[in-house]
DNA sequence: CTTTTTAGTTAGGTGAGCTTAACTTTATAG
DNA sequence: CTATAAAGTTAAGCTCACCTAACTAAAAAG
């Protein structure tokens, strides 16, 4: 057993080990569905964080409104996203996943995380419990961090 | 306290929470250095896994040898990668990071993982220790999995 | 020694994402 | 009511990753 790494180093090593693998899985799935990564990312955000408008797209992905508009247009054409007027502000649009969109993201998650299953069989129950707890702590901390930053902006 | 999630679900949630953030950090840094993501990814792989050849590039990134050659060419031009003949097989090329290349990746890691530090201050020492241990287990498991697959191929 | 396979490069062309600039439409300020 | 700001779209053009196809050179097979 090696000397335990410091927290930040452990997180970095894990990230580097895991990212390439994870990204590749996504890309393959998206491509198989005829979508690019940026397009699929939008679907994911809509799935996980709910409806939002065009301006949100350009902010979150750090692209111009023009680019956002074009990306979303393709998703609408493909039938994965519904784009309707915001009743509160008729300039704005509200983006929503269609049923097909939700299905796609869910299906992607199932297929893409096949390697998670492969990983799971190599670990015993006790370790898995520890890891689950650790990841939940991390996830919670990230969410708090994001909420705090959102507040600071406003 | 919510009921603990199952291992695979915890891993998925963590991934989704974290990936967007992580990728954006990389992209920004790479762009600031005048590099694209695929280019920077190659630098990372060279930094973490050591020297390899052209064929490895096209395999790992699932692109044609032609595309690999073009990507690497740009990195050579930029002075981040050294491409020399393999003495064992004069057809093959050996790719190595130059000092500038190593520096770049290290600098990227420092800047990009700024959010890790922000995360660290929100957790107490005991939790961080648990998380570190958990991530190390995960990292080890992934590495074993990869090695096994590499063997199966051969 | 000839043939075939392997490693890599070069050239030409395609497609996607992105940007700037000009525009429409709706909301807000003075 | 007019002027300005904001949300989004459209058009034109750029860049870059990627592919196919044709090529060179070295190794391996026969």
Image (tube, coloured by chain):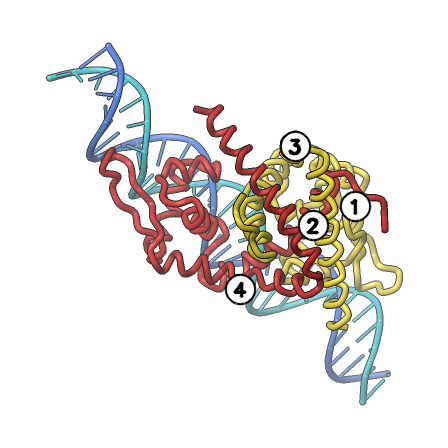
Chain colours: A yellow, B red, C cyan, D blue
* Residue of label 3: A114
Q: Secondary structure at mark 3?
A: helix
Q: Secondary structure at mark 2?
A: helix
> Are the two marked residues, 3 and 4, in contact with CB atoms closer than 8 angstroms?
no
Q: Earlier in the sequence, mark 3 or mark 2?
A: 2
Chain to which the residue tagged by mark 3 belongs: A
The residue positioned 51% from the left and 59% from the top of the image is: B109
- Tell me the CA gap for discs 3 and 4: 32 Å
Q: Are marks 2 and 4 on the same chain?
A: no
- Horizontal side of B109 relative to C9 (left or right) equals right
Chain to which the residue tagged by mark 1 belongs: A
* Residue of label 2: A42
| Looking at the image, residue B22 lies above or below residue A104 | below
Closer to us: mark 3 or mark 1?
3
The crowding category of the residue bearing disc 2, from other C-alpha atoms within 10 Å (few below 14, some 14 to 19, many at least 20), is many
Q: Position of residue A105 (x, y in %)?
A: 73, 40
> Are the two marked residues, 4 and 1, in contact with CB atoms closer than 8 angstroms?
no
Q: Which mark is drawn over residue B111?
A: 4
Q: Position of residue A6 (x, y in %)?
A: 58, 56
The residue positioned 62% from the left and 62% from the top of the image is: B115
């Amino acid at each position: 057993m090696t000397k335990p790494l410091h927290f930040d180093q452990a997180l970095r090593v894990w990230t580097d080990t895991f990212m390439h693998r994870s990204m590749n899985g996504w890309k393959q799935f998206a491509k198989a569905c005829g979508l690019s990564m940026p397009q699929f990312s939008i679907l994911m955000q809509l799935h996980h964080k709910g409806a939002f408008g065009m301006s949100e797209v350009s902010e979150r992905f750090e692209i111009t409104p023009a680019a956002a508009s074009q990306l979303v247009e393709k998703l609408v054409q493909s039938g994965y996203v519904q784009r309707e007027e915001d009743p509160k502000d008729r300039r704005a649009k509200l983006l929503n996943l269609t049923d097909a969109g939700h299905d796609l993201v869910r299906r992607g998650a199932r297929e893409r995380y096949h390697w998670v299953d492969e990983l799971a069989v190599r670990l015993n129950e006790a370790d898995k419990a520890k890891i689950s707890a650790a990841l939940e702590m991390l996830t919670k901390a990230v969410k708090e961090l994001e909420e705090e930053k959102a507040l600071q902006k406003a």
